[in-house]
């Protein structure tokens, strides 16, 4: 029966989410041990240099050197300091681990969403399939942020924008999913909220560290300036990125603004999946496309960060083009749109690989 299949899917989702959470917890404990060994005399003492520039003070006594406080001589931090910095995401080891964990969590979530959507029929499954392809672009963005963390490049405007974009994307996804909670199995909804809450918290925390505190007014001002900058392009490539930026943004906003019918309406599950698709891509696409537009104007598309972002864009929209192959005369327009975006990203990816260091990038270089 349908209820039996739904219970079975709910049980499978619960088991997968539980096993994944246990794996993350185990990996987290290993990451903490690795960080502590690094700081207390182990593997690579250069990893401790960042603590010398950030004084983590917890003890109240002036001039003391208790746990969680930097030694008076500015030397290597203690294990207590390493633990404090690790859990505050103030070092590259913990930031790298969290970005890598978020990639695994979001990929798992995309797979579970597909399993859960099967009960609602082909149309809903198709929209959820389109939504799930966003995980390719998201994973490459998180991969770029992980590389930036390891290379201490988070102060770059590119990574500030990416962190803010991913944070807003996750918060919007949680909001939309919560409004349509009736169409999710309880375990999947909980897992979705946890994954996107973790994504929002990690990206917010790293952005806060990169700008020197929580500065929402500055973030809004910079975001507004970035949006206005899409109307000013200095070359053909950046113009195309700007056009895609606005086109996908308007499509997503229109999907989010569709009036909500009664949950008992037969089209309600389809509209809910359409809104979730829009929520899971609006700010993600915006952040990635603006980063690529800005890089094209600076001649930096060959840098590893933007090569990765173009690869993610090509993967996401290439998969969408395949999912939109015309059937019974339907799907031709979105297939052309998605295929065109994918080909444009593939061309820029290929051009960056062909030009290599001559294009201002290289395998070991990140954004400037």
Image (tube, rainbow, N blue to C red):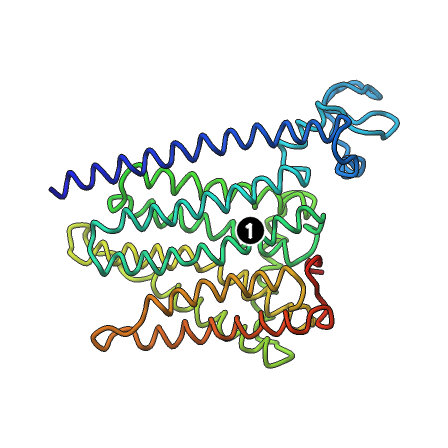
Where 119 falls versus 137 (above or below)?
above
User: At 61% across and 74% down in the image, what residue appears?
Assistant: 351
User: Given the current orientation, which residue lies at the most extreme left position?
Assistant: 1
Rendering quarter of residue 55: top right
Front position in the image: 217 or 13 = 13
Residue 266 location (% of width, % of height):
15, 56
Where 104 falls versus 244 (above or below)?
above
185 relative position to 151: left or right: left
The residue tagged with tag 1: helix, strand or loop? helix
User: At 35% across and 50% down in the image, what residue appears?
Assistant: 176
Residue under label 1, please give it. Answer: 142
User: At 61% across and 48% down in the image, what residue appears?
Assistant: 146
Where 327 falls versus 127 (above or below)?
below
Residue 194 location (% of width, % of height):
42, 38
Quadrant the N terminus occupies: top left
User: Given the current orientation, which residue lies at the most extreme bottom position?
Assistant: 236
Rendering quarter of residue 281: bottom left
Front position in the image: 350 or 189 = 350
User: Given the current orientation, which residue lies at the most extreme right position?
Assistant: 73
323 relative position to 235: left or right: left
Residue 88 location (% of width, % of height):
63, 33
């Amino acid at each position: 029966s349908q209820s039996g299949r739904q219970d079975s899917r709910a049980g499978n989702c619960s088991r997968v989410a539980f096993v994944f959470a246990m794996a993350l917890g185990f990996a987290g404990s290993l990451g903490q041990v690795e960080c502590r060994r690094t700081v207390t005399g182990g593997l690579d003492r250069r990893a401790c240099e960042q603590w010398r520039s950030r004084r983590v003070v917890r003890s109240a006594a002036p001039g003391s050197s208790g746990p969680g406080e930097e030694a008076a001589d500015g030397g290597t931090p203690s294990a207590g300091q390493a633990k404090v910095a690790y859990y505050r995401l103030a070092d590259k080891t913990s930031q790298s681990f969290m970005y890598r964990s978020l990639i695994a969590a979001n990929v798992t979530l995309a797979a579970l969403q597909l399993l859960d959507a099967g009960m609602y029929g082909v149309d809903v499954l198709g929209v959820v399939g389109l939504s799930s392809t966003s995980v390719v672009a998201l994973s490459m963005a998180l991969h770029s942020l992980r590389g930036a963390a390891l290379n201490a490049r988070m102060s770059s405007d590119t990574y500030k924008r990416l962190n803010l974009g991913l944070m807003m994307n996750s918060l919007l996804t949680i909001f939309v999913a919560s409004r349509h909670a009736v169409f999710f199995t309880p375990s999947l909804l909980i897992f979705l909220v946890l994954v996107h809450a973790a994504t929002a918290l990690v990206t917010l925390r790293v952005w806060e560290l990169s700008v020197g505190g929580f500065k929402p007014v500055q973030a809004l001002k910079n975001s507004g300036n970035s949006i206005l900058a899409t109307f000013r392009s200095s070359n053909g490539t950046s113009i195309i990125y700007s056009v895609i930026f606005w086109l996908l943004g308007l499509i997503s906003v229109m999907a989010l603004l569709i009036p909500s019918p009664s949950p008992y309406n037969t089209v309600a599950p389809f509209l809910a999946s359409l809104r979730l698709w829009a929520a899971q891509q609006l700010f993600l696409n915006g952040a990635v496309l603006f980063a690529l537009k800005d890089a094209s104007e600076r001649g930096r598309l060959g840098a590893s960060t933007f090569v990765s972002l173009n690869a993610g864009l090509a993967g996401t929209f290439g998969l969408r083009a395949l999912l939109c192959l015309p059937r019974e005369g339907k799907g031709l327009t979105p297939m052309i749109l998605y295929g065109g975006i994918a080909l444009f990203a593939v061309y820029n990816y290929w051009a960056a690989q062909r030009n290599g260091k001559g294009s201002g990038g290289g395998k070991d270089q990140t954004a400037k």
